[in-house]
C-alpha cells in the first residue's frame, strides 16, 4: 500500500485523484495545490476517505519540503504547471521521494520545450536511490511507451515515426484551449520542428499541414508541430531517420489564434500597461474558458497514436498503434474531458509502475527507457484501450 501526493488541482489533477482513489495500491492520497478550494471540490466529487487536501505554493521549495516531510508519500505526481517541475524535483530529492510528471520544465519567460534542465538531475536522483519519470501523460507519455513497445515486439530498427494527435471533439465555444491555455498557446505558436537525417529542421509555425486519417473519425487536417517527446525519442532511439509530430486544428481555431498573435495577445514577455507589468498571454488565459469547464458539453473523440516504419528480419514493416477516447464518456466517469483524461490516466499508470517496482530504478528517465509491457497491460484496464494495425499501408508512405 502506498501513499501518493498529487500536486495541481486542474483538469488533469481531477482525473489523477479520481483514478488513484480507485486503485487499491494507494492507501492515502494528498491533493495539494495553490487554491485549496479547488482541491476540496475535487476531493468532494471523489468522495473517498482516502483523499486529503492541502494548500501549497509549489514555487516555494521550503513549503513543498515541509509538506512532503509531514505526509511522507512514496511518490509525488506533478500535474501542476511545467514551471513547477524543478522546485518539485528539488523537494523530492531533499526528502527522498519518487517523482513523476507529464510535461517538461519550462522557464516562465521563454518557450523552450526541452528536457535539458531535468536530465541534469539524473546523477543526483541516482545517488539518492530515487526515481523520476518524466513526461508520463499521453503525448508525451503513452506515445513514448507505444514507440518502445513497437521496438520491443515488432522492429529490429525503427526508421520513421509520425505521432498523430487528433481532437475531433466539439465544446460549442468560439475559442478555447483543451488544457492550460498558457502552455497550450506557447506550444502552438512556436516554430514547427522535426528531425530528419541527423538534423533538426525548423519551419514557420503551422506552415506544414496535410489531411491524416483517424480511426472512427476520418480525415482531419493535421499540422506539424514541435513536441517535446521528439527530443527524448530521437536521443533514445538512435536508428530514427525521421521523427515528426502532427496535431489537428480546425480552421476556426487557427483563425482565432492568428488574430490573437497578430495583435500581440500571445506574447510571453511583460508589457507596460498604465504603469503595471502585464504578460499578454497570462491576461488572455484569464479571459478564456477554464479548460475543465468545457467538459460537461463536450462531445466527440480524441485519437492519438504512432505511425511507425522500419525493418524486422530484413523486411520493411509498418505499424500503427492508437487510442481513441470519448469526451462524454470521460465526463460521465470522472467529470473531465478527454484531453485531461488521456493525460491523467497514464500518469496514474506510470505511478503504479514505480510503486510496484516495475519502473523503479535510480535516476531520471523518460518513459521509453522503461519496460513498456506492464504499462501497456494496465493502460487499457484503467480506461485507455489501445489498438494496433500491423503491416497496412501508412498515410506517411511516401513522405
Ligand atoms: P490547469 O491549468 O487546469 O491546472 C493546473 C493546476 O496547477 C491548477 O490547479 C493550478 O492552481 C496549479 N498550480 C499552478 N501553479 C501552482 C503553484 N505554483 N503551486 C501549486 N499549484 C499550482 O492545467 P491542466 O490540468 O490542464 O494541465 C496540468 C499539466 O498537464 C500541465 O503541466 C500540462 O502541460 C500537462 N499536460 C500534459 C499533457 C500530456 O499529454 N503529456 C496533455 C495536457 C496537459 P490554480 O488553480 O490556483 O491556478
Image (cartoon, rainbow, N blue to C red):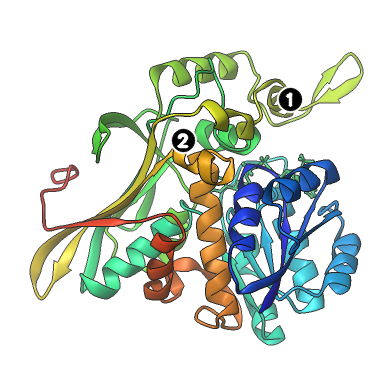
Q: Nearer the viewer, residue 106 or 180?
A: 180
First of labels 2, 1 by sequence position: 1
- For ligand 1, the image quadrant comes to top right
The residue sitting at 81% across, 76% down in the picture is: 95
Position of residue 296 relative to residue 10, above or below, is: above
**Quadrant housing the N terminus:** bottom right
The residue sitting at 70% across, 57% down in the picture is: 85
Give the class, few, some or many, for how many residues have Cα within 10 Å of label 2's Cα (few <14, many ≥20). many
Residue 117: quadrant of the picture: bottom right
Q: Is residue 30 left or right of residue 274?
A: left
- Helix, strand or loop at label 1? It is helix
Q: CA distance from mark 2 to mark 1?
A: 26 Å
Residue 116: quadrant of the picture: bottom right
Q: Nearer the viewer, residue 5 or 237?
A: 5
Q: Is residue 356 left or right of residue 28?
A: left
Residue 190: image x %, image y %? 52, 35
Residue on which the image places disc 1: 286
The reply to whether residue 339 is visible in this rendering is: no
Mark number displayed over residue 328: 2
Amino acid at each position: 500500500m502506498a501513499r501518493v501526493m498529487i500536486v495541481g488541482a486542474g483538469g488533469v489533477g481531477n482525473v489523477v485523484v479520481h483514478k488513484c482513489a480507485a486503485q487499491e495500491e494507494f492507501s492515502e492520497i494528498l491533493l495539494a495545490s495553490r487554491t485549496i478550494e479547488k482541491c476540496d471540490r475535487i476531493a468532494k466529487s471523489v468522495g473517498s476517505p482516502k483523499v486529503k487536501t492541502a494548500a501549497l505554493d509549489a514555487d516555494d521549495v521550503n513549503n513543498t519540503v515541509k509538506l512532503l516531510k509531514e505526509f511522507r508519500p512514496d511518490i509525488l505526481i506533478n500535474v501542476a504547471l511545467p514551471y513547477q517541475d524543478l522546485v518539485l524535483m528539488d523537494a523530492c530529492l531533499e526528502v527522498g521521494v519518487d517523482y513523476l510528471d507529464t510535461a517538461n520544465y519550462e522557464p516562465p519567460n521563454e518557450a523552450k520545450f526541452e528536457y535539458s534542465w531535468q536530465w541534469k538531475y539524473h546523477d543526483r536522483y541516482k545517488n539518492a536511490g530515487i526515481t523520476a519519470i518524466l513526461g508520463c501523460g499521453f503525448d508525451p507519455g503513452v506515445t513514448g511507451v507505444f514507440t518502445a513497445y513497437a521496438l520491443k515486439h515488432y522492429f529490429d530498427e525503427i526508421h520513421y515515426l509520425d505521432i498523430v494527435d487528433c481532437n475531433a471533439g466539439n465544446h460549442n465555444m468560439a475559442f478555447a484551449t483543451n488544457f492550460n491555455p498558457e502552455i497550450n498557446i506557447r506550444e502552438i505558436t512556436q516554430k514547427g520542428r522535426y528531425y530528419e537525417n541527423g538534423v533538426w529542421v525548423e519551419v514557420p509555425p503551422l506552415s506544414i499541414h496535410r489531411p491524416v486519417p483517424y480511426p472512427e473519425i476520418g480525415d482531419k487536417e493535421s499540422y506539424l508541430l514541435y513536441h517535446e517527446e521528439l527530443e527524448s525519442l530521437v536521443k533514445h532511439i538512435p536508428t530514427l531517420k525521421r521523427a515528426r509530430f502532427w496535431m489537428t486544428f480546425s480552421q476556426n481555431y487557427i483563425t482565432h489564434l492568428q488574430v490573437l498573435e497578430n495583435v500581440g495577445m500571445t506574447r510571453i514577455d511583460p508589457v507596460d500597461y498604465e504603469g503595471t507589468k502585464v504578460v499578454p498571454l497570462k491576461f488572455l488565459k484569464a479571459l478564456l474558458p477554464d479548460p475543465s469547464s468545457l467538459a460537461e458539453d463536450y462531445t466527440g473523440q480524441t485519437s492519438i497514436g504512432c505511425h511507425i516504419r522500419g525493418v524486422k528480419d530484413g523486411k520493411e514493416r509498418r505499424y500503427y498503434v492508437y487510442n481513441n477516447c470519448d469526451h462524454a464518456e470521460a465526463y460521465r466517469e470522472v467529470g473531465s474531458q478527454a484531453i485531461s483524461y488521456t493525460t491523467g490516466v497514464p500518469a496514474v499508470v506510470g505511478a503504479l509502475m514505480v510503486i510496484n517496482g516495475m519502473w523503479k530504478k535510480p535516476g531520471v528517465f523518460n518513459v521509453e527507457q522503461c519496460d513498456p509491457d506492464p504499462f501497456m497491460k494496465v493502460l487499457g484496464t484503467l480506461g485507455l484501450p489501445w489498438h494496433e494495425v500491423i503491416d497496412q499501408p501508412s498515410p506517411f508512405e511516401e513522405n
